[in-house]
Image: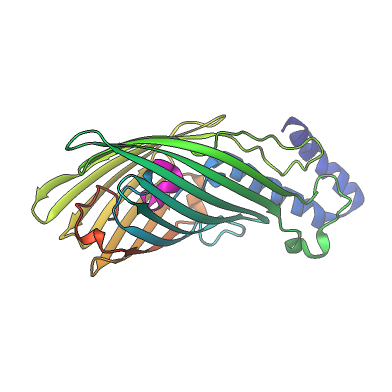
Amino acid sequence: MESGLQGLFMWPINEIVLGNMKKLILKILIFSLTVVQFTLSAQQDPMYNQYIFNSYTINPAEAGIRAYGTASFLHRWQWVGIAGAPTTTSMGVETSLGSKWGIGLNVIADKIGPEVNQTVNFSVGYHIKLSSRYNFAAGLNAVTNHRRLNTALFNNVYDPDDPDLQAFNIFRPNLGGGLLLYSNHFFIGASLPRLIQYKTPANGTNLALDQVRHMFIYTGRMFDVSPNIRLKPSVLMKGVSGAPVQFDLNGVISLYKTIDAGVNYRLGDGLGLLFGITIKERLIFNYAYEIPLTPIRNNTQQTHELGIRYRFGKAHVEKVQSPRFFN
């Protein structure tokens, strides 16, 4: 990274001499977006306000935790109004296989500026009954990650011979694992979704970032306030090498097992409002609105998430729901 910073400081002198201001502006833009992506480590492993929505992508032990299956779609528009701001689309399916096994498949397309990051995540979970109240699960996941720089966005500015603007197209497989202890009213989990760390190739571009490990530790509990009201607080801790530990605090109230409303607070980063509605026990719509708390709030006040889930299989009406964000 040091060589990349040295190159950045030399760019203005070189470009002014050459008179090529378009290329100078392009380099500064890409470098700025890359720094944003490096600082927001969530862009390597995309995170959402509704992170429990696709929990088996965080922890493969979550696959098969319910007796029924779910098909899901989620889209996040981050920092609406800022050119090149991140957008994330996630589609997945997850189900149990008998009483002990579960599988999940999730496809994510994450875009920030000219860089596109596509991830396919396949999870397998194995569940053991410890007692009349508690269950334990262990999981493994296989991940493929494809990152590329979309040079088509550069139009006539892109120079394939420029050493500081080299396109990249990187494919990286990975493995991960996780553990989960849960009951009908409590859960605690820990995971490393990507065990293998990758360094940028020596002949690669300065814009292709390293891939580092992410650790997640999370817990939550459901409280029955009344027969028709449930309170679901939860907390998630995320650790990434070279970045501060990040905490998400969440609180959701569920009314009549149909309406969910809550708050998500990412310490020092953002405040989110959450809403969900369940239609005829099977179809769930989720929405989240996030207000940034960092200096970027001077340029945008809008981040939106829209999620849709569909429960399939008959078992979902017979089994007590596990305490998840939006069941």
Residue 154, x across and y down, in percent:
76, 61
Residue nearer the viewer, 193 or 127: 127
Residue nearer the viewer, 297 or 287: 287
Query: Which stretch appears magenta?
Result: 50-61
Q: Is residue 288 visible?
A: yes
Residue 179, x across and y down, in percent:
38, 34
Residue nearer the viewer, 26 or 242: 242
Magenta portion: prevailing SS class: helix
Query: In which quarter of the view is residue 247 placed?
Result: top left
Q: Is residue 76 magenta?
A: no
Q: Would you say 51 lies left or right of 319 here?
A: right
Q: Would you say 249 lies left or right of 75 here?
A: left
Q: Would you say 327 lies left or right of 177 here?
A: left
Query: In which quarter of the view is residue 314 placed?
Result: bottom left
Residue sitting at x 71%, y 43%: 208
Residue 89, x across and y down, in percent:
51, 60
Residue 200, x across and y down, in percent:
72, 37
Residue nearer the viewer, 304 or 108: 108
Residue sitting at x 22%, y 36%: 134
Residue sitting at x 91%, y 47%: 17
